[in-house]
Image: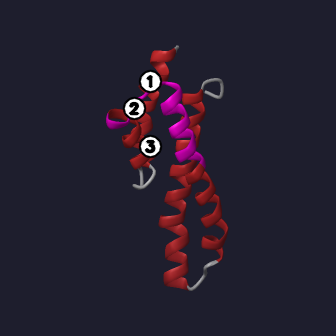
Amino acid sequence: MFKSPIGRLRLLALAEGISLLLLVGVAVPLKHFYGNPALVRALGPVHGLLFLLFVLNTLRVGVEYRWRFATTTWKVLLACLVPFGTFYVDYKILAPLQKQMR
């Protein structure tokens, strides 16, 4: 998985998706319902960094593999804005693309 750009993008998608779910599903409720913002302070920057890395790598891989923006790249980019989106795009787009490249 680490050897190809798509494999590395898939790993970033997994990490970004998990960080978003932890932030929205655990850290934000702890902050708002229990008044404990510590986890938001810790996870927020981590998620932000993973988000930026995912977006930049999506654009880089899209250019490298000559993805059409209208058919592939925008779907992958949109996925990082929706909870569970990166898992879906990994299953539907990235995993099949990686199998094609083998």
Secondary structure of residue under mark 3: helix
Q: Tag 3: residue type? A: Phe
Tell me if label 3 and label 1 are in contact, CB under 8 Å: no
Q: Residues within 10 Å of mark 3 (few under 14, many from 20)?
A: some
Query: Which residue in the protein does label 3 denote?
Result: 87
- Which quarter shows the N terminus? top right
Q: Residues within 10 Å of mark 1 (few under 14, many from 20)?
A: some
Question: Residue 15: x percent and y percent?
Answer: 58, 47
Residue 83 vs residue 81, the one in the foreground:
81
Magenta extent? 53-70
Direction from residue 59 to residue 8 in the image, left or right: right
Residue 66 vs residue 80, the one in the foreground:
66
Q: Can residue 49 be seen in this view?
A: yes
Depicted 7 relative to depicted 88: above or below: above
Give the residue furthest to the left. 71
Distance between the alpha carbons at the discs numbered 2 and 3: 10 Å
Question: Residue 96: x percent and y percent?
Answer: 42, 24
Give the residue furthest to the top. 102
Label ID, residue 93 = 2
Q: Tag 2: residue type? A: Ile
Depicted 32 relative to depicted 3: above or below: below
Tell me if label 2 and label 1 are in contact, CB under 8 Å: yes
Residue drawn at 47 percent across, 19 percent down = 99
Query: Which of pointers 3 and 1 indicates the residue nearer the eye?
Result: 1
Depicted 64 relative to depicted 86: above or below: above
Distance between the alpha carbons at the discs numbered 3 and 1: 15 Å
Q: How crowded is mark 2: few (under 14 residues within 10 Å), some or many (20 or more)?
A: some
Q: Is residue 14 visible?
A: no
Label ID, residue 97 = 1
Q: Tag 1: residue type? A: Leu
Residue drawn at 45 percent across, 25 percent down = 66
Question: Residue 17: x percent and y percent?
Answer: 50, 50
